[in-house]
Amino acid sequence: MATTAIDQVGLPDKEIQKLFQFHDSLSDADLANLFPIVTSQLSNWLHSIHLAVFTLEQNVQKQSVQNQDLHPLELAMKRLEPFIQTLPEISELIPTNSAYMTTTRIQSEWSSLQHFLASVKKLVSTSQETHSVAATLNQLLAQMDDVSILLFDFQEKKHHAAVPTSSLSERAGSESTNSFYSDSETTKHKDDQAMADLDAIFEPLFNTMEHMYHRMAQQDDPVLHKRFEKVKDKWEALQYERDELKWEHKEDRWLTVFRRVADQVDVMIDGLDRSVVQCYSLIQHMRDWQATQLPATPTSAFDKFSKALRLHPKASPPSTPPPVDKEKFRSVEKSFEAKYKYYTPSIDRMLAMLGNGISARASRDNQTSQRHDSMLQRWHHLKEVMDELRMRDLAETERMLSSSSSISSASSSPTDSNSNHSRWRGIRYRTPEPSNERHEWGRVRSVTPNHALGRSSPRKSIPNSPQTEYYQQSLLRGSISDSSSVGSSPPPKRQTKTPRPTRNSSTLTTQQEDFYDADERDYGVDLMKLSKANTPTTNKRSPSSIGTRPATATATTPRSKTPNPPTHRRSTAGAGGVRSKSSMGDISTRTMSPSFSKRSVTPSLIPRPKTPTSRYGQQQKPPPVPPIPKYASH
């Protein structure tokens, strides 16, 4: 409207041109008539422009003025400015006071209009700046709200993604490790992408806020300052939330790395643990085998006798082979050493890295710290076990294997294998022969057969005796009836002067099944009968040196289960009767010495004491009395 009013008012350009061109030819009256026309038109222009500027000022307060509204006023001012500059020249053409006063008034109005227009322009510029700042603040608030919603959504998704992971961990690993790592990788990729999007959004917001700080320093509007304070609070809260989210994301990534490294450490520790268990299993088998090969120190006579037989250089049975061969032991040891060589520095380095990471954390996770501590304790314990295994146990087991292999190689040589086997069988089925030692009547022979071990008796034997030479050339042969007797073949029977009673209470025993027939059925063959059939029976002892025993007995007192003391036995020199040298002879030809106790009928490996026939007249100790079965007959 102001622009339309200004356009309707004309400028006195024709009048001013006529005044300057014809002022010499015009009279004073004509000059006086033209001057008021020019000044009136200029005053109208000034009033019209002033009214337009005033209207613009009012619109500025209503915040409805744009920079485009100032453009027509600036054009009008530019059109009026040349006419205002010609007013001093016009006043010189009309040298009157009224003309001078009118020219001065118009110039003053022009100057005030310029100031008024400048102030309005400033108001418009300020209004525009305020409006721009307010719009920017509103835009910032809207963007911050969007970022806050995005952060909230990111946290919600992260929480929902963490819930099934915790439930799966509570179910003790229902999914495989590969799927777990793949899910972790996918989640990690999504989280990284979300954090990249947040950084892309925060970058322009950060730049806008930096610019707003400078713009607000030039603003005096309290409303804008109040709104800007609100924006700053929102921005600071958003930055704190974003920094916290980034820290949580960083912690999650570190926890993921910690779990992965910890799982790798657990796998390596488990591998070493299994290798140690495998080594100790072999070591325990070797120790058990060694315990069976080296029994405890014998305490009884039977244990001593058995140990003496086992330790005999020519009658030792071949030991059982070790349960572990050298190749297998070397393979297990090599596998353990390889794992120890490569896993130990890696585990130490990884545990140190995890410890440094835990120490560098601002806030510690209890589960992470507990797991790291448990891994450290487990690793230190395993290292102690491995050091003990490498320094002591493996070396001992290797020495055992080396000694067993050397013994087995020596025992399995082609020249000695058959002889050793036959000697062991001889020891298995033979009993010790009587020694040619001198025993007094009141002495009892030791239960340990020294002759079987190739040793001489503490008592001196009779030199150059036939029996001495015969017994020295013989070996121990076992009895399949598990009784201890001496001799490789049935010896000649000796006669005793004193008749010996039979085992039964009757005067004559009834004919019963031979004990050794049953023994033959049990063991398959009667070795002593075969030996008796193949050995000549001409080797008889003279009645002068060996007593005889009667074939029948009248005493009814049963014999004791243990050998009788020498003081309870009777010996005469006149009785006739023969007894077999070996306990494997026919039962019908065997008689017994008189005794008031009953012998045991249980077969035993303990050698029986030898019964002397005479204290002074007999120089050699007779062979021990063999055990008689319960139902033996003549």
Image (spheres, rainbow, N blue to C red):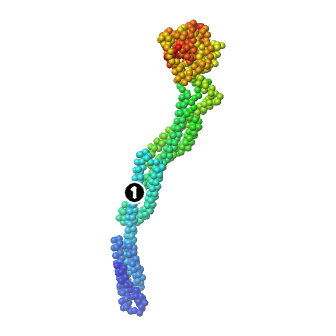
* Residue 36: percent from left, percent from top: 36, 86
In the image shown, does 127 or 279 lie closer to the viewer?
A: 279
The residue that mark 1 highlights is: 153
274 in relation to 560, above or below: below
Q: Amino acid at mark 1?
A: Asp
* Residue 25: percent from left, percent from top: 41, 93
- In this orientation, does residue 383 appear? no
Q: Residue at x 63, y 18 (%)?
A: 472
Q: Tell me the SS state at disc 1.
A: helix
Residue 27 falls left or right of residue 468: left
Q: Residue at x 43, y 90 (%)?
A: 21
In the image shown, does 360 or 471 lie closer to the viewer?
A: 471
270 in relation to 226, above or below: above
In the image shown, does 239 or 114 lie closer to the viewer?
A: 239
Q: Residue at x 50, y 13 (%)?
A: 509
- In this orientation, does residue 146 appear? yes
Residue 132 falls left or right of residue 593: left
User: Quarter of the image holding residue 606?
Assistant: top right
In the image shown, does 28 or 287 lie closer to the viewer?
A: 287
* Residue 70: percent from left, percent from top: 39, 75
* Residue 356: percent from left, percent from top: 49, 46
125 in relation to 290, above or below: below
Residue most extreme to the front:
511
CA neighbours of label 1 inside 10 A, class few (<14), some (14 to 19), many (20+): few
User: Quarter of the image holding residue 325?
Assistant: top right
